[in-house]
Image (tube, rainbow, N blue to C red):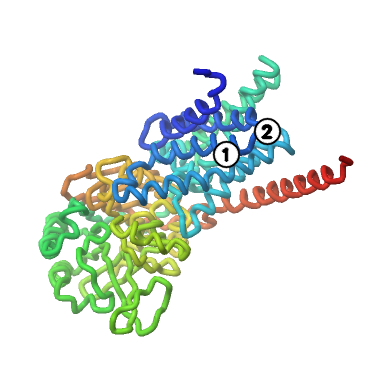
Amino acid sequence: MNVKKNSGWWMALLGGILLWAGWPTSPLTLLLFVAWVPLLHLADTTSSWKKFFGLSYITLLLWNVLTTWWVARASVPGGISAFLANSLIMCLPWMAYFFTRAYFSRFVSGLALITYWMIFEWIHLNWDLSWPWLTLGNAFALHPNWVQWYEYTGAAGGSLWILFSNVLVHNVLVRYREEGRSTGYFKLAAAWVLTLCLPIVLSLFVKQQLTLLHNKYNVVVVQPNYDPWDTKFAAGKEEMQLQELISLSQKQIDAQTALVVWPETAVPYTVLEDQLRDNLFLKPLWGFLQNNPKVNLLTGLEGRRLFSTRVSRYAQKLPDGSFVEGYNSAALFDSVSVQIDHKSKLVPGPEVLPAFLGFMGPVFEKFGGTMGGYARDSSERILQTTNHTFNITPAVCYESIYGDYLSQFNRKGANLICVITNDGWWGDTQGYRQHMQYARLRAIESRKWVARSANTGISCFIDPYGNIVQQLPWNKQGTLKQTVAAFVSETFYTRYGDWLFRTVAILALAFLLILIYKRIVQKRQSAQKPS
C-alpha cells in the first residue's frame, strides 16, 4: 500500500475518530481541542475542491455514525438518512473555508472557519431539520466546572473555544514546520496554552450569588421503566401503568411535597385536551390529586384537539370532514384544573417533517412519533403551580438541548426546569447518557435546578451549577425526592439568549460577502486577459 498516496484518507479517518473519541460520554474531551487539525491540514494540502469535499465528508460521516449510531435502533432507514444528510450539511462551512483560504492568510481564514461553523450551528438550532445534538459546545457536559461561564455565552461559547483552539494548533504546527523553534512559534504555542487554560480558570470566578425565592419544598421524580417497544404502548395495559405511576408517587409524597414529575407520554392514552376532566381513564389521576390537594403533577401526555376547519398543515382530515391536531405535551395538573404546553422543538422525522419531505412520513411512522407530524405551540408557556411554589420551564425530551429556547421561559419568570423524556427508544446506548448530560448545561445557563424524569432512565436532579445531586440508573423503576430551591436570579444568557451565535453570524456573512466579491473580481480579471 502506498501510504503517502493514501495519507489524505488516513487523515480524514483520523479526524472522525478524534471527534468521536472526545465526545460525551467519553472522558477524553481534551481530544476535541485538536480534532479538527486533520481537516485543516487536508485543506492546506489538497488542491481539488472535489477531493477536499470527499475527504471532509468522510470525517463528518464517521463522526456522525460513531457518535449517534443509536438513532438507527429505532429506524434503520431513518437513521441512515439522518447520517448522510447531516454530514452533507456539515460540509458547507468547510467548503466555504476551503475557498476562503485563497484570499486570506492562514490565521484569518481560520477565523473565517470559526464563523462559518458557528453560523451553521445556529441555523441547525432553528430550522425544521434541526439536529443540534453535535453542537460542539455540548461536549463539555461532563465537565461543568470547566464551563461555568455558560451563564454568559451558552453552548456557543464552548463551540468557539474548541474551534479557536484547533485553529491555533494548526497554525502552531505550520509555523514549526516552516520556521522551527522560532519566536513566532513560541508565541503561538503560548497563545494556545492560554486558550486552553483561561476559560477553566474563569469558571472559578463566575459563580454568581443567586437570589432565593424559597427552599422548603420538595419535588418527587418518578421513573416507571416501561419498555416503549413492548409494554409502554401495548393495548390493554394503560390502566395498570397509570395505577403504578400513582402508587410510586404516593410512596414518596410528604407534607412538603409541592410537585410530582412523570416522564414524557406517561399517560399511556391519547386524550382530547378539552375533555381531560371528563375522561374516564383519567379518573384515578384526578382522585390521586384530590387526595393530595397541595400537590401538583407534571406529566407528559399525547393529546388531540378537534377543529371544524384545517387550522395548520399538521391537521389531519377525519372521515366526517372535521380535522384533528396531535400534540406531544407537558401537562400540569392540580386537583381541579390543568395547564398544557405543547412541545415546540420537534424531532425531525418522527415528530415533524418539512413539507418537501412529506413523502418520507411512512419511513418514520414507527420511529417513536407520528406519521402525520405533531403540531406545536407558537410561544413559550410557563406552567405555574397552583400551590405558588414553582414556575416551570417544561422541556419535553428533545427540547432540553435548546438553550436559547429554554432561556425564553426563564425570561418570563420560570424558576425550575423540568425535563420529561422517554429515551427508551434507543435502548442501552450512549443516546440516553448524552441526553442526560446535556441537561447539566441548561442548569448552568439559567442557574436553575433541573428535575429530570425519564421513562427508562436516567432520572435525576441537577443543581444550578450543573452537578448531579441524585440519579436513578438505566432500566430501574423507582422514585427520587429532593428539596429544590427556586431561584429568581437572571443570568446574562437568560436575558440575551444566543447573542454569541448572532454576533458571529454577522462576521460570517461579512466573510462570505468578501469571498463572493473577490471571486467575482477574479473571474472578471481572468476573462479580460488576452488568450
Q: Which amino acid type is shown beneath numbered disc 1?
A: Phe
Q: Name the element at disc 2.
A: helix
Badges 1 and 2: C-beta atoms under 8 Å apart? no
Q: CA distance from mark 1 to mark 2?
A: 21 Å
Q: Is residue 517 left or right of residue 115?
A: right
Residue at 59% x, 32% y: name it. 40
Residue sitting at the far top: 181
Q: Quadrant of residue 116?
A: top right
Looking at this view, is 239 or 527 the one in front?
Answer: 527
Where is residue 26 drawn, in percent x and y? 37, 33
Residue sitting at the far front: 531
Q: Which one is in front in this view, the residue at disc 1 or the one at disc 2?
A: 1
The residue labelled by disc 1 is 53
Q: Is residue 193 left or right of residue 449?
A: right
Q: Which amino acid type is shown beneath numbered disc 2?
A: Phe
> Label 1: how many residues lie within 10 Å, few (<14), some (14-19) or many (20+)?
some
Where is residue 170 drawn, in percent x and y? 60, 28
Residue at 47% x, 36% y: name it. 204
The residue labelled by disc 2 is 107
Looking at this view, is 491 or 356 the one in front?
Answer: 356
Where is residue 411 drawn, in percent x and y? 47, 61
- Exactly how many numbered labels are in the figure? 2
Instruction: Say which quadrant the C terminus sits in.
Output: top right
Q: Name the element at disc 1.
A: helix
Q: In the image, is residue 281 above or below residue 157? A: below
Looking at this view, is 257 or 494 the one in front?
Answer: 494
Looking at this view, is 49 or 153 the one in front?
Answer: 49
Q: Is residue 34 left or right of residue 222?
A: right
Which disc is residue 451 wearing? none
Residue at 52% x, 41% y: name it. 159
Where is residue 379 drawn, in percent x and y? 45, 68
| Mark 1 or mark 2, earlier in chain | 1
